[in-house]
Amino acid sequence: MKKLFFILLVGLCSTLQAKEKFISVKGKEIVDANGNPFLIKGTNLGNWLVPEGYMFKFKKTNSPSQIHDMISQLVGPAEAADFWATFLENYITVDDIKFLKNTGVNSIRVPFNYKLFTNESYMGISDATRGFDLLDKVIDWCKQEGLYVILDMHCAPGGQTGDNIDDSYGYPFLFENERNQDLAIEIWTKIAKRYAKEPMVIGYDLLNEPVAHYFDTKTLNGLIEPLYRKLTTAIRSVDKNHIIFYGGAQWNTNFTIFSEPFDSKAVYTFHKYGDQPNYASIKRFIEFREKYNVPIYIGETGENTDEWVTEFRGLLEKNNIGWHFWPYKKLDNPKNIISVQLPENYQTIIDYAENNRGSYKEIREIKLNRTEIKATLKQYLENIKFKNCIPNQGYIKALGLNIATPTQTK
C-alpha cells in the first residue's frame, strides 16, 4: 500500500508540475497560466540599459557609445565609469517597480544591449556578467510585485537597425555577418536557458526594429526572417516555455517580411509613433492576425499628447491588442509616466553635446567649467531616483492607470 501511495503521489506531483505555468498563446490570444486572455498593459524601461540621447535632451550625441564618449571628455574615463555605475543603480529601482504596480500595469518591457553579456566595453565597464546581474535584479523585483517581463534585445551584435537606437556603426551589419549572428544566437541561448523556468518572464523580443528604412530594404528585409528562424531554433533547444516576439522591418511596421508562422508560441509585434490614432493605422496588423491566427502586440508607442494617448490606447484595447507604451521615465518631459527634474546648469552639458567634437582641436577649444559640470552630473544622478521624479498625472490617466504617488510605494 505504501508503495502504491508513493507511486500515486509521484504521478500527482508530475501532473501538477506539468501544468502550464507560463503566459502563452492560444489562437489569436495571449493567455495566462489558466488559459484566460491576458491583455498586456505596461511600459518600457527605456534609457536604463540602453541610454538614448534624446532622453538626455541631446540631438547630435544620441547613441549609448556617443554619450559615453562625451561624458568621458567632460570628466575623464574613470569618472565616466563611476557615473554609469550610479546611473544603473539609481535609474530603475524597486521603488519604480512598486510604483508601476500601483498604477495598475501588469508588465514591463526591458530593452538591453547585447554588450552587457560580453566583455566588450559598455557604459565604462567590460563585464560579461553584468547583463544577468541586472536582469536578475529587475525580474526579482517584478516577481515580488506580480509584474511580468518581456526581454528585448534593443542592440544586437553589429547592429540590427543601423541607427542610434542599436548603438551601431550606422548600418545593420548583423544581417550580413555570420560572426555577429552567431554571437546574437549565443547570447539569446544563454538568456533563454537561464530563464527557461521563470514564469514571470513572458518571453523574448528577438530584435528591436530591424533594418531602418534608409537602406536597401529589398535585400536586407529578406534576411530578417531567416535569422529569426535560427534564433528560434537555438532558443527552443533550451526553452520551450516562453513566447517569442517577432518584430517587423522598418521600425517594426512592415509585416510583409513574414511567411507563415513557424513557432507555436509566436507573437508578432509592431511599433507605432506619430500616426493618426485610428483603425486605418493598425488595420494591416489586424489583418495579419486574422490571416495567420496569431496574436499581435504593440511593443512601443506613445510620446504624444494625452489626448492622442487616450484615443490610441482605447483603440488598441477595443481591438484586443496589448501594449507597452514608451518610455516609463524621461528627462523633463510630460509624454511619459514620470519625469526627471532638470538639474541646475544642465544647458551647459546640452551645449557641449551639440558642439562639434570631431577632432581633438575642436574638443580642446570648448571652454569648460569642469567643477560645475561634475556638480550638474551628480545632481542628475540624484534627480533620476524615483523619490525625486514627478508623476505625469495626465499621461497616467490617459493610459487608463491609477494616479499612484511616490508615497504609495513605501
Image: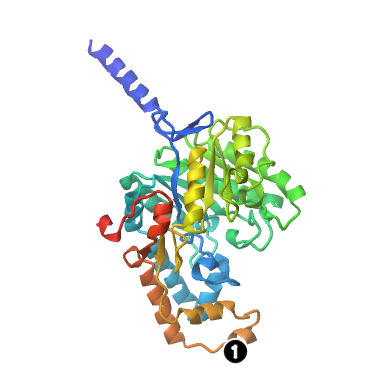
Which quadrant of the figure has residue 158?
bottom right
Q: Residue at x 42, y 28 (%)?
A: 35
Q: How many marks?
A: 1
Q: Residue at x 63, y 80 (%)?
A: 356
Residue 312, image x and y in percent? Answer: 51, 48
Q: Quadrant of the N terminus?
A: top left
Bin the neighbour count of mark 1 within 10 Å (Cα to Cα): few under 14, some 14-19, many 20 and up.
few
Q: Secondary structure at mark 1?
A: loop
Taking the image as shown, residue 208 lies to the left or right of residue 191, namely: right
Residue 29 in view (yes/no): yes
Taking the image as shown, residue 238 lies to the left or right of residue 11, namely: right
Q: Quadrant of the C terminus?
A: bottom left
Taking the image as shown, residue 208 lies to the left or right of residue 346, namely: right
Residue 397, image x and y in percent? Answer: 39, 53
The one nearer the camera, 224 or 35, is 35
> What amino acid type is highlighted by mark number 1?
Glu
Residue 275, image x and y in percent? Answer: 60, 53
Residue 212, image x and y in percent? Answer: 67, 55
**Residue 391, relative to residue 279: is it above or below?**
below
Q: Which residue is farthest top?
A: 1
Instruction: Report which residue position mark 1 lands on.
Output: 365
